[in-house]
Amino acid sequence: MTADLLEDEAEAHVRGVCFKTGPPARTGVELEWLVHDRSDPRTLITADRLDAALAPVEVPGAIPRGSRMTREPGGQVELSSPPAGSLTECVEAMAADLAALRAAMDRADLVLTGFGLDPYRNPPRLLDHPRYAAMEGFFDREGPWGRTMMRRTASLQINLDSGDDSAGITGYRQRWELAHRIGPVLVAAFANSPLSEGRPTGWVSTRQATWAAMDPGRTRQPDHDPDPRSAWARYALDARVLCIRGDEAATAGGKEADWTAPPGLTFRDWLRGAAHGLRRPTVADLDYHLSTLFPPVRPRGWLELRMIDAQDGDAWVVPTALTATLLDDPVAADAALAATEALCLDGQPLPPADVWRRAARIGPADPDIGKAVGACFTAVESALARSDSPAALRAAVAAFAERYAERGRCPAHDQLDALSRV
């Protein structure tokens, strides 16, 4: 982990650790929440108040099913489930852990709010860590979007196995392609961030628009390659270095630390010795660099789908069920590939950037995207009916489809409707 790293070794390492193959079986979900004051959602929550609210659930065993709780720079709170053996197990475990977190918030007169972007506040950065200071400085060079992402956004991430070595629907190559094919569908169907500073932004997913405006070398999808491992290795090494990790012990001891990376330095440049006066990178540096890449689908030994806005209340179960079913049920997967064919232009296998923008701007009101959203919901409803999934889960998906997908709407429209009634 501490020896100098060569370029071919780096490429081999990325290929090996980011796509671990095997039969797809596990499901995980990460729920990120904005934290609001119960009586006034415009109130800024201090670090001390958040610390006091979360203290009861930071005791070992307080989160009953083992989800990991973390905090984001703007005071958002995230629960990350352990991998579950089925969709049903994942949903049930996260529901139990979320209930514990909500109870702690309730005792502190705080609420977990599931919007993709805070519609009212622009909070300060609450986490004083050199990673976030370096990240903020990196993104500040190109505009305000990085600070917005770090402090004001919240997402819902689905984690699924990469797949096996087969050439079929369970293979990692096709699962990688399908995850990107349904990406704009998921953006549109669950868009939930149309407001900023209390006013419409012109986007139904301002969160996704924010990501798209940031450093494209770490936020866009990789160029298509029949071999996803090669595509990802190129992407990772050609991305600019966001920060260079220093001494964690010194940081924990309260000492000043500067993790700022030289401007414009890619990891490949660093491997080739282009950063004069800077030590050579190690495997540990490469692993940390991989954690600073934020594309819509991030391979981490599994596939992490990162393009979905946070959902309010218990609506998170619907994108979790939709995504897991589209990738893990062979019939639904085939239907999703067919449904998204029209989103892939000029014979390309993946939707272009324009489709992602349309999904974020107008959501399922876009005719082609809306049609794909409807077809994917139909396929998932049929798949769940064939399975032993709980009736409550099937009902939640059906109710969401009736309220939104079948009407060319998404949760963002509820926020816009509420604003128009004020």
Image: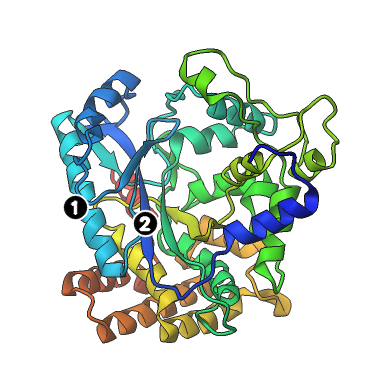
* Quadrant of the snapshot with the C terminus: top left
Task: Categorize mark 2 by other alpha carbons within 10 Å: few (<14), some (14-19), many (20+).
Answer: many
- 228 w.r.t. 388: above or below: above
- First in residue order: circle 1 vs circle 2: 2
* Residue found 70% across the figure and 74% down from its top: 226
Q: Is residue 397 visible?
A: yes
Q: Position of residue 389 (x, y in %)?
A: 23, 76
Q: Is residue 352 left or right of residue 76?
A: right
Q: Position of residue 177 (x, y in %)?
A: 59, 72
* Residue found 45% across the figure and 31% down from its top: 73
* Residue type, label 2: Val
- 213 w.r.t. 408: above or below: above
Looking at the picture, tell me which residue is in the foreground, 140 or 103.
Answer: 103
Q: Position of residue 4 (x, y in %)?
A: 75, 39
Residue at image mark 2 = 29
Secondary structure found at label 1 = helix
Task: Categorize mark 1 by other alpha carbons within 10 Å: few (<14), some (14-19), many (20+).
Answer: some
* Residue found 26% across the figure and 83% down from its top: 385
Query: Image quarter for residue 138?
Result: top right
Secondary structure found at label 2 = strand
Circle number at residue 96? 1
